[in-house]
Image (spheres, rainbow, N blue to C red):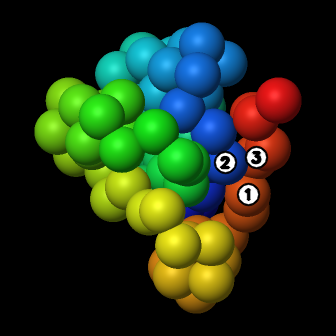
Amino acid sequence: MKIGVIGTGNIAQYLLESINAGGKLEGEITSLFGRNQEVGSRLDTKYGIKFYTDFQEFINSPVDIVIEAAT
């Protein structure tokens, strides 16, 4: 299962660590949407995901489910 996450804060980082690095769920986060370019780029590099700042591009990315983790 390919997962998309909206947000780049603590919850999103926890999900990336738990799912992508920890394998606590069958599947992986492949797409991340947010406004913070600095954090998004760092997470992109660290977890090998695709970071988006354009919402339509994010929604059109190949994901099966989206998790909202933004304030």
* Mark number displayed over residue 50: none
Disc 1 marks a residue whose amino acid type is Val
- Check disc 2: other Cα within 10 Å, few if <14, some if 14-19, many if 20+: many
Inter-mark Cα distance, 3 to 1: 4 Å
Q: Nearer the viewer, residue 37 or 68?
A: 37
Q: Are marks 3 and 1 in contact (CB under 8 Å)?
A: yes
**Which element carries disc 3, helix, strand or loop?**
strand
Q: Position of residue 54 (x, y in %)?
A: 53, 73
Q: CA distance from mark 3 to mark 2?
A: 6 Å
Please state the horizontal and vertical placement of residue 49, each as a whole percent of the image: 32, 50
Measured from the top left, where is residue 12 in percent x and y? Answer: 59, 27
Front tag of 2 and 1 = 2
Q: Which residue is mark 1?
A: 66
Q: Amino acid at mark 2?
A: Ile
For the C terminus, which image quadrant?
top right
Q: Is residue 15 visible?
A: no
The local crowd at label 3, few if under 14, some if 14 to 19, many if 20 or more residues have their Cα within 10 Å, is some
Q: Where, by quadrant of the figure, is residue 65 drawn?
A: bottom right
Q: Which residue is mark 2?
A: 6
Give me the residue at 54% from left, 32% from top: 8
Residue topped by disc 3: 67
Please report the residue visible at 79 percent of the width from the left and 44 percent of the height from the top.
Answer: 68
Looking at the image, residue 24 lies above or below residue 61: above
Disc 2 + disc 1, Cβ < 8 Å: yes
Q: Secondary structure at mark 2?
A: strand
Residue sitting at x 55%, y 54%: 33
Q: Tell me whether circle 3 and circle 2 mark residues in contact (CB < 8 Å).
A: yes
Which element type, helix, strand or loop, lies under badge 1?
Answer: strand
Q: Is residue 47 above or below residue 44?
A: above
Mark 3 or 2, closer to the camera? 2
In front here: 24 or 51? 51
Return the residue nearer the eye: 57 or 1: 57
